[in-house]
Image: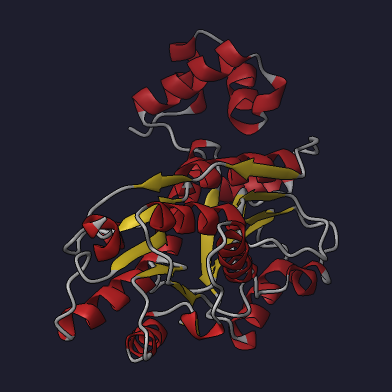
Amino acid sequence: MRPTLADVAKLAGVSVATASRALSNPDLVADGTRRAVRDAAASCGYKINLVARSLRIQRTDTLLVLAPCIDNSFYPGLVHSIEHAALAMGYAIIVGFTNKTDKYREAYGELLSAGRVDGMVVMDGGSGVDRFTGPRPDLPIVQVFDQIYESPVPVVRIDEQQVADLAVRHLASMGHRRIAHIAGATDAPSARQRRNGYTAAMARLGLPVDDHLVRNGHGHREGAVEAMKELLDLPQAPTAVFCASDSMACAAMDVCRDRGIHVPGDISLIGADGTCDGEHVYPSLTTVDVPRAEAGVLAVEKLVGLIRGQAVASDTMLPVELKLRGSCAPTRTAVAA
């Protein structure tokens, strides 16, 4: 027999009205009572009827999550953390991979206009938050990582320039001076900031900034392959390469392998984002780890806070850290010295 709200209330030792508030409007209930009701609901398998509830309270308890693509392992991992956090707070999610095309963006814009969702998490810097807020100017929105500066929308982000700084400093500490950069998509704010961070770090360390050492990988594997080939074909090839993402770094590693160039003996490679891509290559990829799980949770907490009319921090900056693996080594010159 399907458990009822009365069953939950009895298990939690509260009234049916209190159990209902704890599940529908948790901010109106004390923390201890809220936990007791949620634990009771979980133990007896009680599920909220989201359709009936949305009709009653004029809310859908559904969030829209927009990401640019599914073929980059960075985004599915982030979406997973958002989904986990949303479900824990009583919300379902609709995931939209916009693929950077207007066709998909218009479709999700219509979804918003129809009032099918209560709020939106955007992790696509090229999607243009402004175009979505037109039909619903009061729609709660939170950005993750790619910040759209023109929009006064709360953001959970990292210092993208610090990502590049950590990578370049690590390579320089191993004696590398000719350090190249394979940049990400030109329309992504994070990619532009990482490229600027690379240039700034090279300058601070007194290393030569050669335009020939910066190649555009366009944020995907095919672009990174072409960029790495161009770098290796230079009259004076780099001794190390910082790639703006792990997926591009893994593609660069494949190019080296095809040409018989040993990583890290002949050239060092370092990626960024800390995705699973770098764990399953040989040698394993040194990377700058981005806290995606934490970012997903914070984004949902901010969004739910906005939906409930609460004040939230407008800008949350999370730390990044260098994750040392096997793809970097001292230059031959440094070893000889």
**Of the pair 199 and 287, the residue shown nearer to us:** 199
147 on left or right of 163: right
Residue 113 can be seen in this image: yes
**Of the pair 190 and 178, the residue shown nearer to us:** 178
| Residue most extreme to the top | 13
**Location of residue 204 by image quarter:** bottom right
**Location of residue 34 by image quarter:** top right
40 on left or right of 313: left
Identify the residue at horizontal 73%, vertical 65% (top origin).
Answer: 148
Q: Residue 22, position in %: x, y?
A: 61, 24
Report how many numbered discs are placed on residues in the image: 0
Quarter of the figure that contains the C terminus:
bottom left
Model colouring? secondary structure
Q: Residue 329, position in %: x, y?
A: 26, 57
**Of the pair 234 and 336, the residue shown nearer to us:** 336
Identify the residue at horizontal 65%, vertical 14% (top origin).
Answer: 30
103 on left or right of 268: right
Q: Residue 239, position in %: x, y?
A: 33, 71
In the figure, 69 relative to 145: above or below? Answer: below
Residue 218 can be seen in this image: no
Identify the residue at horizontal 60%, vertical 62% (top origin).
Answer: 197
Identify the residue at horizontal 55%, vertical 41% (top origin).
Answer: 319
**Of the pair 146 and 65, the residue shown nearer to us:** 146
Q: Residue 271, position in %: x, y?
A: 39, 62
In the figure, 9 relative to 85: above or below? Answer: above
Quarter of the figure that contains the N terminus:
top left
In the figure, 169 relative to 11: above or below? Answer: below
